[in-house]
């Protein structure tokens, strides 16, 4: 079957850290109202995992008007933490410039995208969610936490940037890995996150599967050769980590595997920071396009009176400084002019949209990633 809606992706830019890391800021804020002092302590929910600080705070403004501190919690997927850490500082400064009597403290929670979505669905008090998979957003819509028309609330279908999947190999590429088909060889060991908890891992699986369908001229319904190829590939996986950053750690620090399947931004970050001089990036000939949707969790912000600040936080992702920051971190910004200025680092690669090949995300999840789905069957040991 000939693949439809195959697009040429534009240059990309990106970055990321470990599973379910929560960057948390529990800070009292003081409201001075007509001489009355009211202490309001906002306690932010978090996952019971490693905690670090990403406080974005500006200098106190001297003003006779009432002052207000605002805490926002951004619950996000695993390898976005480095971008949002810098964006939070950028946003907080801009917000206080426009609102001299207010300060914004942005807390971050990171982990596997679907695991994060489930945490929010189960009560984690996120003000905004920034995922890498539409199905995770749909879960929160079903729970009544995110508005059903969330894609209309922001530009570009509420997707500020995209990415794709690439292959990270050892320096010098000793195994001679050039494309997806090499991952099915018996002498190659693979590291990826767990598709049951990680959106990045699902894209890794779909990238390889889509390549198989494209190469063998097959369809999802008639995929005998592709299934054989994917079964060999999955037999080479040496670890399924909970999240993408944990998989990066397994590959770069624990020395597991010959190749890491990961997002482009995470691969560049590893090559320039985590494992500089120890790894190389291989761009496959054909890969999957990753959309990264964002939304306000209105069920939380409306009650807390933070909807305006949360909306402003997400809208700022489309401002030129934020789009430029994305490009510098190897994420593909939606602003075409900013993207075009970074073609030297964000290489041209042929990509496909998952929904154009596999159907809507509800169908993708039911076909491949539910218990007993195609991933489970192909990954099982015979």
Image (cartoon, rainbow, N blue to C red):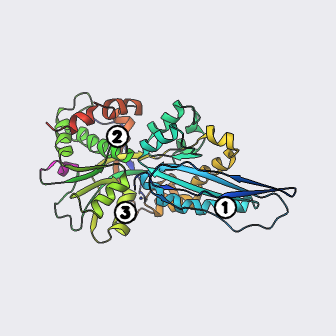
Residue 350 position within the rendered picture, expressed as x and y whole percent measured from the top left: 33, 49
Task: Determine which residue is flagged by label 2.
Answer: 196
Magenta highlight range: 180-186
Task: Determine which residue is flagged by label 1.
Answer: 94
Q: Which corner quadrant of the image does residue 1 belong to?
A: top left
* 203 or 319: nearer the viewer: 203
Q: Is residue 7 left or right of residue 28?
A: left
Does the stretch in magenta take in 185? yes
The answer to whether residue 281 is seen in the rendering is no
Q: Residue furthest left?
A: 186
First-in-chain label (1 vs 3): 1
First-in-chain label (2 vs 3): 2
Query: Tag 1's secondary structure?
Result: helix
Q: Residue furthest top?
A: 221
Depth check, mark 1 against mark 2: the one in front is 2
Query: Tag 3's secondary structure?
Result: helix
Q: Is residue 159 above or below residue 355?
A: below
Q: Quadrant of the C terminus?
A: top left
- Marks 2/3: CA–CA distance: 25 Å
Give me the residue at 44% from left, 53% from top: 49
Task: Determine which residue is flagged by label 3.
Answer: 268
Give me the residue at 19% from left, 57% from top: 177
The answer to whether residue 123 is seen in the rendering is yes
Evaluate if marks 1 and 3 touch, with contact meaning CB atoms under 8 Å apart: no
Q: Residue furthest bottom?
A: 277
Q: Which corner quadrant of the image does residue 34 belong to?
A: bottom right
Q: Is residue 202 left or right of residue 143?
A: left
First-in-chain label (1 vs 2): 1
Residue 296 position within the rendered picture, expressed as x and y whole percent measured from the top left: 59, 43
- Marks 1/2: CA–CA distance: 38 Å
């Amino acid at each position: 079957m000939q693949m439809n809606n195959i697009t040429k992706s534009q240059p990309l830019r990106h970055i990321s850290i470990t599973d379910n890391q929560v960057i948390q800021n529990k800070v009292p804020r003081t409201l001075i109202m007509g001489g009355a002092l009211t202490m309001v302590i906002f306690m932010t929910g978090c996952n019971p995992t490693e905690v670090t600080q990403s406080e974005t705070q500006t200098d106190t403004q001297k003003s006779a008007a009432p002052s207000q501190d605002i805490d926002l919690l951004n619950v996000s997927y695993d390898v976005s933490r480095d971008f949002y850490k810098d964006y939070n500082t950028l946003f907080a400064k801009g917000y206080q410039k426009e609102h001299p009597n207010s300060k914004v403290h942005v807390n971050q929670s990171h982990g596997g995208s679907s695991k994060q979505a489930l945490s929010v669905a189960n009560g984690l008090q996120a003000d905004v969610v920034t995922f890498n998979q539409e199905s995770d957003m749909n879960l929160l819509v079903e729970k009544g936490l995110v508005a059903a028309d969330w894609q209309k609330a922001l530009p570009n279908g509420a997707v500020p940037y995209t990415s794709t999947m690439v292959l990270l190999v050892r320096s010098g590429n000793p195994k001679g890995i050039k494309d997806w088909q090499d991952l099915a060889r018996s002498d190659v060991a693979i590291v990826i996150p767990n598709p049951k908890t990680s959106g990045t891992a699902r894209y890794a699986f779909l990238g390889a599967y889509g390549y198989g369908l494209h190469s063998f001229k097959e369809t999802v319904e008639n995929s005998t050769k592709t299934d054989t190829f994917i079964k060999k590939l999955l037999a080479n996986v040496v670890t399924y980590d909970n999240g993408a950053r944990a998989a990066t750690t397994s590959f770069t620090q624990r020395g597991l595997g010959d190749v890491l399947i990961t997002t482009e931004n995470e691969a560049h970050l590893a090559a320039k920071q985590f494992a500089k001089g120890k790894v190389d990036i291989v761009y496959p000939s054909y890969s999957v396009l990753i959309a990264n949707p964002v939304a306000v969790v209105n069920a939380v912000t409306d009650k807390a009176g933070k909807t305006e600040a949360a909306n402003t936080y997400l809208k700022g992702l489309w401002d030129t400084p934020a789009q430029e920051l994305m490009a510098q971190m190897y994420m593909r910004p939606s602003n075409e002019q900013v993207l075009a200025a970074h073609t030297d680092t964000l290489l041209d690669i042929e990509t496909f949209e998952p929904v154009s090949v596999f159907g809507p995300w509800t169908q993708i999840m039911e076909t491949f990633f539910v218990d007993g789905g195609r991933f489970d069957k192909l990954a099982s040991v015979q």
